[in-house]
Image (cartoon, coloured by chain):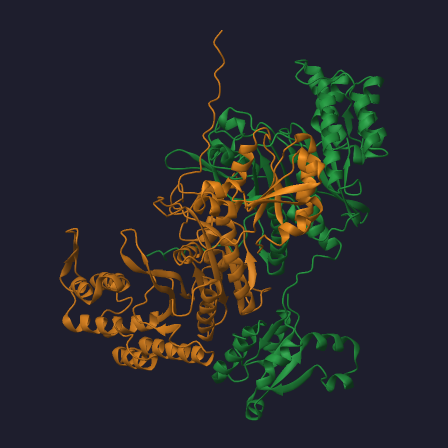
Chain colours: A green, B orange
């Protein structure tokens, strides 16, 4: 008889493109989310938590015109044939909620949401298929006062999580001004002319890269084309000198005071209704922010901000961290964008047919955490840990009682629960846990009703600096009466 | 030419079996999770956050022996043919992590995790396909000291979220004792006898229902069978009187002190090695808990606890809320189980082939929230909100500056951002938002540099109790200098 085939053991593996977060990584992100939620809440935004799963129909963009509509999303088909998918952002679920509960929600509806979103993309270094977003949006407020409020709130958020004033700048632009400039440059929206549509596309993509390419690079791309460092040739848009001049004037529009910037923009878009409306909106935003004390040291008008997403219809904004860090190649660079958003007036309309004005911001929590870490500000702020060691396994009740006493005083503490035979392993364990203190009570200490306290952090410091002789005096270990254990430790631990 | 077919509008609908959580529902659950995390952390447990997605292979139980392995889970196939699924609990991912990182994690590894899990089940009233779990587990600790620690922690958790001592009881049993009883009753484990296997199954299911059925019902089910109120007949296990006697003695084993209960159990399992080992473990747990001050007013030994899950191998425990609430039919009932867990020594072995002892608890956060609400303890604890109304749309900057001033003093406040034309709508909005105060400044007030403050909560109370004449005096509305706005409100608002 053939031997029955054994089921092979499953592989213990995080799925490709996903990751696990341990201890302080979790705590640190949670602390940041809490801080941000606090600011959002103070601005009158209400929490909303939708489920991770939406119907593909309501998510949109990913309608099942193919057998398996998993372009960009994780999707599956229900037994009743409906397609479900994991949300890919927090804006699509908001649009669904705003439509579904439109009779019950206050209008305007300010809401914040935070949580993971999923993208079915090829994972790459530092690019994961599940990541956190942290959004605030106002639905139903047509006035740019709503946009101004969100910019002010974004500044408050950045400072509250630990980005110093001066280390960030919020740059505000308006899609309408951009449309006006392109109109003035004879590249109007919806012209129906294929060549103009293509040229507009090139211009938008190029403006977005102005930071990196500079004027010369932009000029090349807008005229004859450009050969990059690797020798790759990009075809130019073939624009004329007057067109390029307008666009470069626009991109470099942020010069001098906000008033000067706005005057320049007004001049450049002259003749375009849309453009002038956009400049007026920027003017209003600047005025509202100044009145609340948010000056150009925090929020500026900057025509070079485009924002990739196609659905923006008015003000757009981006928060950039301006301090330098070393990039992958060790070159100092400004840290760059950590949040952005803008006005999108058509997303709810998909469901209801009625236009519902909306504006919002999304904060890249993981980028922001990385930024704080780069500034050495991302401290874990975990409580000091006390490990009670086990010298006599029959006295486990005593050791657990010590830990319970410490905890009752608010001190993080635990008993070693592995095999207590090898005491060295217990100290190695305490070390691996990053414990601040180890408590030891063997027969001798028990008889005298005392405990030994090992200050592991001091011990580690001493081990680096003192001689063997001094080390032998064990200044980092001392004893105290069992009855004084809690007080002795309480005076020494660091707590949140 | 045929008119181009319009794409129908998508339905704005939460997918079946899922739900949306608004405002205080989110805040309340978050506050509870934070409190629980605080206790877990103080016990030395470290946070772990795995992604929502696991490979079907590592989740186990749901191996792709059918084309679509979505029995009970939401699963989908990747382009590279791998099956992925949403986690259905937090224990399976822990087993995967414990195996995957076994060389890096401290051992024992105490970890806590909280977050949504997903079940692909038929949704029912109050039964959702996404819900929260909040677990703590110790992996790598064979000693029942680990189980005792988790029971103590569970008691601390319940009290810290607001369940009073006396309103809950943690009941502890041991699967080994149960196995011993069944051995003594000639229903041994792994007998290979089909009838005995079936009888064991009936016995386990019946013991689990002892609460509801009482001795008589259990006796019927273990012997000839039982006809329930609806006339449905359940076949009996056909056991003899001596067998039933043993089992009933066991189920009713919790009588008198813990020592008496243990003595009774010891007597009943006499002759079964497994059973005696189980009683000894219970004895140790009771001793450890007593030493830490957790007496029988909080934690008891109760042989009627079975716990459904098949993977438990030793101590099992359940937290029950003992106060009465009205059930769906208006009948007063004990609230019932809100948390449970136990020892499972085989889950990590699936991956590594090596036995890894583990024990843990899972708290039903939503049940616990419902329990607190039933006790009127689930207050939202939201900050009071101030709504600044808009009397003159050209003076938006002034109104936003008022809100900004209030927020700087830590007061939750917002400006009305809808169409300001109809002032009544603004007050209706403030009402819908549950605002505590409305701020009003029209031309007249502006000229005198004052603001009107409407105490909306006082106003609502007065409206219920005073006459129209008194109401006209508007005692709930008063004015103060603009410069005193922040101080005046600060003295009156409730903050967290």
Residue A159 x %, y %: 72, 50
Residue A183 in the image, given as x and y percentages of width and height? 74, 18
- Give the quadrant of residue B271: bottom left
Answer with left or right where residue A16 lies relative to residue A151.
left
In this view, the residue in front, A450 or B136, is: A450
Q: Horizontal placement of B180 versus A285: left or right?
A: left
Is residue B476 shown left or right of residue B449?
Answer: left
Locate the C terminus of chain A and report the quarter of the image it occupies. bottom right
Residue placed furthest toward the top: B1
In x, y percent, where is residue B399? 67, 38
Q: Which quadrant of the figure has residue A144?
A: top right
Q: Nearer the viewer, residue A417 or A372?
A: A372
Residue B354 in sight? no
From the viewer's side, name the closer residue of A335 and A424.
Answer: A335
Q: Quadrant of residue A488?
A: bottom right
Foreground residue among A258 and B143: A258
């Amino acid at each position: 008889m053939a031997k029955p085939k054994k089921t092979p053991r499953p592989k213990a593996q995080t799925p490709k493109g996903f990751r696990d977060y341990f201890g302080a990584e979790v705590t640190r992100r949670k602390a940041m989310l809490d801080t941000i939620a606090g600011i959002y809440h103070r601005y009158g935004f209400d929490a909303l938590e939708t489920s991770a799963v939406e119907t593909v129909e309501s998510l949109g963009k990913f309608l099942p015109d193919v057998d398996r509509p998993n372009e960009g999303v994780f999707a599956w088909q229900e037994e009743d044939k409906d397609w479900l998918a994991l949300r890919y952002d927090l804006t699509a679920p908001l649009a669904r909620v705003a439509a579904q509960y439109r009779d019950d929600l206050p209008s305007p509806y300010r809401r914040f949401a935070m949580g993971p979103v999923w993208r079915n993309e090829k994972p790459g270094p530092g690019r994961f298929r599940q990541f956190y977003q942290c959004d605030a949006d106002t639905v139903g407020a047509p006035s740019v006062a709503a946009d101004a409020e969100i910019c002010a709130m974004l500044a408050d958020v950045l400072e509250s999580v630990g980005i110093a004033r001066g280390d960030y700048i919020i740059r505000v632009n308006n899609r309408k001004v951009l449309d006006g400039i392109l109109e003035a440059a004879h590249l109007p929206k919806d012209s129906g002319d294929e060549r103009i549509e293509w040229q507009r596309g090139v211009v938008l993509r190029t403006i977005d890269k102005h930071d990196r390419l500079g004027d010369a690079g932009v000029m090349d791309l807008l005229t004859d084309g450009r050969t990059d460092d690797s020798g790759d040739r990009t075809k130019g848009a073939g624009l004329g000198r007057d067109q390029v001049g307008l666009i470069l004037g626009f991109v470099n529009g942020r010069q001098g005071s906000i008033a000067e910037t706005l005057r320049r923009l007004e001049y450049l878009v002259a003749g375009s209704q849309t453009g002038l409306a956009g400049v007026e909106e920027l003017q209003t935003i600047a005025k509202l922010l100044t009145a609340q004390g948010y000056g150009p040291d925090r929020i500026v008008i900057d025509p070079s901000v485009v924002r990739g997403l196609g659905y923006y219809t008015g003000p757009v904004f981006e928060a950039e961290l301006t301090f330098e860090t070393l990039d992958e190649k060790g070159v100092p660079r400004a840290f760059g964008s950590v949040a952005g958003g803008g006005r999108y007036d058509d997303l709810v309309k998909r469901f209801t047919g009625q236009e519902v004005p909306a504006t919002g911001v999304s904060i890249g929590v993981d980028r922001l955490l990385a930024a704080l870490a780069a500034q050495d500000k991302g401290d874990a702020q975990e409580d000091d840990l006390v490990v009670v060691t086990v010298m006599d396994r029959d006295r486990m009740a005593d050791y657990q009682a010590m830990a319970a006493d410490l905890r009752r005083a608010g001190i993080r503490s635990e008993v070693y629960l592995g095999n207590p035979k090898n005491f060295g392993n217990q100290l190695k364990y305490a070390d691996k846990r990053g414990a601040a203190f180890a408590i030891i009570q063997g027969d001798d200490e028990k008889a005298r009703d005392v405990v030994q306290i090992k200050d592991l952090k001091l011990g580690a410091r001493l081990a680096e600096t003192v001689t063997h002789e001094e080390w032998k005096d064990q200044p980092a270990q001392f004893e105290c009466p069992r009855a004084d254990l809690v007080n002795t430790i309480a005076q020494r631990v660091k707590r949140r």
